[in-house]
Amino acid sequence: MNDGSAWIAAVEAVEASQSSFFKFITANDSGETGGHQAGFHISKSAAPVLFKREFFKGEFHEEDIQITWQDGFITDSSIKYYGRKTRDEYRLTRFGREFNYRERIATGDVLVISRVEYGVFKAFVLKSEEEIENFLDTFGLSPVDSGSIIEIARTHVEPNEEDEFAEFFKTLGGEFPPTELMSAKSRDIELKVNDKEYEILSNPDKKILDWTASEYRLFRFIEKSLHIDQVKSGFSTLEEFVTLANTILNRRKSRAGKSLEHHLSFIFSKNGLPFSEQMVTEENYRPDFLFPSIDAYHDTSYPRKDIIVLAAKTTCKDRWRQILNEAENLEKHHLFTLQQGITNNQLDQMFNANVQLVVPKQHLFTFSEKYRGKILTLTEFIGTVKNVYLK
């Protein structure tokens, strides 16, 4: 099923399942790290989808299961828990020679596993950026939720957040707030609840993930508060239902990218970096960030080597080439993404096109080890900018 409809089938399977999870496929999962065993590492948070009970250090457990993949191919596979001294992990393994594991599975794809019943599962591998984003948007998920159980009615709110969310909702007058206000309020609440403002300077990689997750929770809280009564009371016509569903889905699609930009902008400002946002370079292109300014970019006497451009994309499997036209006068482009894992081939193409990838430090492990030293963390990128402009 490679016609772009795999995400729809995955959505339907999740909605009909007992329980499901999704994860971005890492370089270790796909075999790009050179490992010989084909299989997926499963986070502890997703383990309840596969296993009936929790396991503990000192145990080893293995179960045979059956998986039906999106094209109808069935594998007799195995789920394992390794609780030995040097290992404390869950894995999904054994697919058979006819499965063509390395042809089906690539770093950066999204794996969706749905439980029909214990021991019987459906699985989907989403490959295109559009499929992945459509699937995540349908359930109001973010890339930072990778490895999590998919809650059909996502009502999860972190401890001490709910009162803050509710107070903010009261100020909205029954309307969704603009994306900039939503991002700002989610930062305010996260900083108030966790009281770690110093991390904006000391650990911006952690902060960008904290704020992305916090904003998704706030977004879902507001979404539920606005629409739950209408959903419970039902619809008088099919058109009413479709209109509301489309409104919700389109809103989910439109806010994700802007959210990332808002949080990065705040981090850059707090770190004292000089920059311009969304300013026209040429042919009406608007790169997300230009350092030190748009004026410097248009000043032909300003050294080109001292101008840095950064694009921000939630995922970047397929559309990273779009950034190459955003600042034609520069040889090198930087790209920040929440994407977890990209194939070695795609990374080679990026590096050959002088695209410098920037990711949260916590996501480095999802890339092939031989490329990790070529990828900047957000902290390292900020340091690079400071070295140029704040000497």
Image: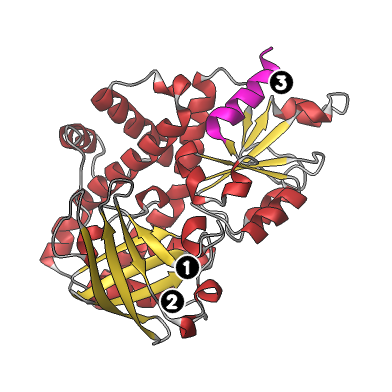
Seen from this angle, which residue lies furthest left?
233
**SS for tag 3?**
helix
Q: Position of residue 122 (x, y in %)?
A: 31, 77
Q: Nearer the viewer, residue 136 or 254?
A: 136
Q: Which residue is mark 3?
A: 388
Quadrant in the rendering for residue 185: top left
Which range of residues does the magenta coloring cover?
377-391
Badge 2 vs badge 1, beta-carbon distance below 8 Å = yes
Q: Which residue is mark 1?
A: 131
Compared across the picture, whether 361 is left or right of 210 comes to right
Q: Amino acid at mark 3?
A: Val
336 to 352, vertically: above or below: above
260 to 245, vertically: above or below: above
Q: Position of residue 226 (x, y in %)?
A: 22, 51
Based on the picture, tell me whether residue 41 belongs to the magenta stretch.
no
Q: Position of residue 348 (x, y in %)?
A: 70, 55
Q: Which residue is mark 2?
A: 6
**SS for tag 2?**
helix
